[in-house]
Image: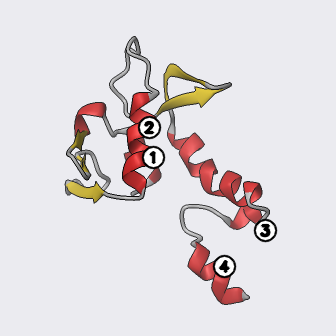
Amino acid sequence: MRTEEFTHVLMSDVKKYPDIFHVKIEITKTKVKRSFTISQPFYDIVAKYIAKRPAKVLTSGFFIRYSNGKCHDQVIGKNKFSGMPRAIAEYFGLEEPERYTGTYSLIQHEEKE
């Protein structure tokens, strides 16, 4: 998914089934709608994320801000999403974390070694 596409995912775009989540991507850069499924082991992670969502959140956006142990009524923007690969690389102590962007994959990193 493109960074901006994450910001357009709504709660209504994520359907829960007994063993999968079905996610529809309605707004895309190419104007072609897509969908995918999430199964184990990520199913449990998504279920926990949804369960932590406060009932009083006014936004219908799927991804909301989480800080200091609480979810907040604010959607995550594209700049926050684009910085996540670098933050993950820093957390795991990988070399050159600044190179982890939406276009730099772990596979490319492993090929260098």
Residue 83 at x, y percent in the picture: 63, 49
Q: Which residue is mark 1?
A: 45
User: Rounded to the nearest whole Å, what is the CA distance between mark 1 and mark 3?
Assistant: 28 Å
Residues at marks 4 and 3, CA–CA distance in whole angstroms = 10 Å
Task: Relative to 99, say whether 10 is above or below.
Answer: above
* Number of residues whose C-alpha sits closer than 10 Å to that of mark 2, classed few (under 14), some (14–19) or many (20 or more): few
Q: How is the image coloured?
A: secondary structure
Question: Looking at numbered disc 4 in the image, what kind of residue is underneath it?
Answer: His
Residue 111, x across and y down, in percent: 64, 88
Mark 1 or mark 3: whose residue is earlier in sequence:
1
Q: Determine which residue is flagged by label 2.
A: 48
Looking at numbered disc 3 in the image, what kind of residue is underneath it?
Glu
Answer with mark 2 or mark 4, whichever residue precedes in sequence: 2
Asked whether the beta carbons under mark 1 and mark 2 sit within 8 Å of each other, the answer is yes
**Which marked residue is nearer to the observer: mark 3 or mark 2?**
2
Mark 1 vs mark 3: give the one in front.
1
- Viewer-proximal residue among 6 and 67: 67
Mark 3 and mark 2 lie on one chain; the one further toward the N terminus is 2
Q: Is residue 65 left or right of residue 111?
A: left
Secondary structure of the residue carrying numbered label 2 = helix
Q: Quadrant of residue 112?
A: bottom right
